[in-house]
Image (cartoon, rainbow, N blue to C red):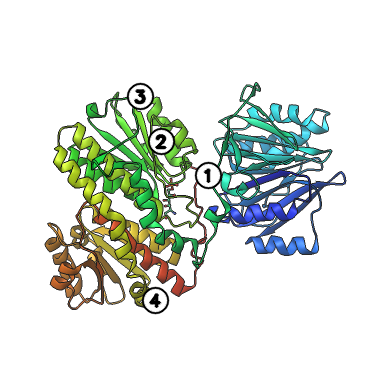
Amino acid sequence: MCGIIGIVGKSAVSDRLVEGLKRMEYRGYDSAGICTVFDDQLVRRRAEGKLANLVKVLKTDDAAGNIGIAHTRWATHGAPTTSNAHPHATGEVALVHNGIIENFKQLRDELTARGRTFESETDTEVVAHLVSEQVEAGHSPADAVKAVLPRLRGAFALAIAFRQFPDFLIGARLGSPLVVGYGDGETYLGSDALALAPLTQKIAYLEEGDWVIITRDGAQIFDKDNVPVTREITTSGVSAAQIEKGNYRHYMQKEIFEQPTVVAQTLSSYIRPLEQTVALPQMDFDLASVKRITIVACGTSFYAGMVAKYWFETFARVPVDIDVASEFRYSDPVLEEGGLALFISQSGETADTLAALRHCKENGQTIAVVVNVPTSSMAREADLLLPTHAGPEIGVASTKAFTCQLAVLAALAAHLALVKGKLSAEEEREIVRHLIEAPAALNAALAHDDEIAAMAHLIAPARDVLYLGRGPDYPLAMEGALKLKEISYIHAEGYASGEMKHGPIALIDEAVPVIVLAPSGPLFEKTVSNMQEVRARGGKVVLISDAEGIAEAGDGCLATIEMPTVHPLIAPLVYAVPVQLLAYHVAVAKGTDVDQPRNLAKSVTVE
Ligand code: M6R
């Protein structure tokens, strides 16, 4: 999604704005631009495609000035061309925007009728014209913004520069995050703390409806009713080192290998290792009285939710409804008074999930949130915040956030089972012992990296790949397929093994590799039968199992990947590793852009 940075600085800002955009590349974008205020002029430079193109433009045509705004755009309205790239400007005003102005058509018609002309197809340009009209009529920039914000429907984070006012920028947020960074004689605006990481650690998070004037001396924040407010200045834990690749070739690779550490880090907040008990944060509702849980999430977080459904139902015997967030509100879900709704999200800003959360809140649900960004909108709106401690996840393909989500959800399931009286203290201790084994098991899984890299050429030429799994390995199959699709652009589907014979089996031939996830255990025999159905039709199978499973069913497979033998509870965490590594190495073999795959955004802040 779009990234915003603004600097009111003591020295030239152009290079620092571009550096800020680089730190936000992970969000996904298809054009970029900057605008400084210099010598009573708005100096605007824009380019389609990667940031390197903008840097090239700036090499021949620099943007001088100590104040400026910059943007990476993920196209919504209008193709990713230079004329649609932000900043959008009139003679007086330049601005950058993240989000969608839903009533832009009506506003554009109105502005056109007043004789204003547009140079882009974007929704954003109407905001530049609306603010500009006010300034041209003699209103102050603050009054102009105050007049325009109530006219905008939809979601926005805005940073606005004014030709005649080289000492301040104005920012505003509604529905899309925006932070203020406090430096030494400088002040910043950014989409997130990551964007500002090397500039400052002192961050204030704007709240819904806030707008702000930033100067070199600090910031004046106003709420949606234009009342001056103070927002707490916190020290962001994000260091520049955390957002570097280190010795890894890609962020995704680094994040896959961080999993033993970050899962251990996450678990340490949810278990007491000495007592071998689960420890959840304080909650002001009675978990034991929960009769039904509604889980809502998107993408990889949704698959973590599907695994959790198995756990909540098998351990705690609490029924679970689960839906993807983009469908949830439109299916008119039945939400019983006093129910628990659980939202899972890496970013905590996914628009569909956030909208579903608000819908549940309005309908009397208690809101629990498993989230990786503790300052995110979802975290702030939760009744029960269950943070994952994966650290910043930069690769667009989610990896370490997923295994950390599973760690939190396993702890929650165990605790729910305990308070529901479905688990004895000894059984709880056993679960905790297995969770403690997870980081070492993840390490053992990662040890197969070279072997998986060596087999990537078997999958890379395929047009289609099927992933099969049963029980909690079924969501893992879908997660494996999603990873492969996202970064290698190979069409892939995840199926419940037993469902394959009801249709997808028609796809099987020797050109369609089938990845079978089958840890030995109660579901193994059945999954292997489905695997034999594939092989009987000439299908090429890659079996991911443990030593026992491979000894029993590995013969005749195209390849096998041996996982450590683990308890079924932690198998979903461990089996995530080979599917992540397989997708990663296939993408590397195909030469795709692993960390910034085409068309994708890291956090999807539009519905
Ligand atoms: O930040 P969230 O967890 O809410 O994001 C949800 C999905 O957009 C995300 O998982 C997406 O599917 C990833 N690119 C998967 O790798």
Q: Mark 4 points at which residue?
A: 461
Mark 1 or mark 2: name the one nearer the start of the chain: 1
Q: What element carries label 1?
A: loop
Q: How crowded is mark 2: few (under 14 residues within 10 Å), some or many (20 or more)?
A: many
Q: What residue type is labelled 3?
A: Gly
Q: How crowded is mark 4: few (under 14 residues within 10 Å), some or many (20 or more)?
A: some
Q: What element carries label 2?
A: helix
Residue drawn at point x = 63 percent, y = 52 percent: 72
Query: Alpha carbon of mark 1 to alpha carbon of mark 2: how far?
Result: 29 Å
Q: Mark 3 points at which residue?
A: 364
Mark 4 or mark 1: name the one nearer the start of the chain: 1
Position of residue 96 relative to residue 26, above or below, is: above
Query: Alpha carbon of mark 1 to alpha carbon of mark 3: how far?
Result: 34 Å
Q: What element carries label 4?
A: loop
Q: In this view, does 601 lie to the left or right of 21?
A: left
Q: What residue type is labelled 4?
A: Pro
Mark 2 or mark 3: name the one nearer the start of the chain: 2
Mark 3 or mark 4: name the one nearer the start of the chain: 3
> Looking at the image, which residue sits at the far front?
274
Image quarter of residue 6:
top right
Query: Alpha carbon of mark 2 to alpha carbon of mark 4: how far?
Result: 39 Å
Q: Name the residue under label 1.
A: 237
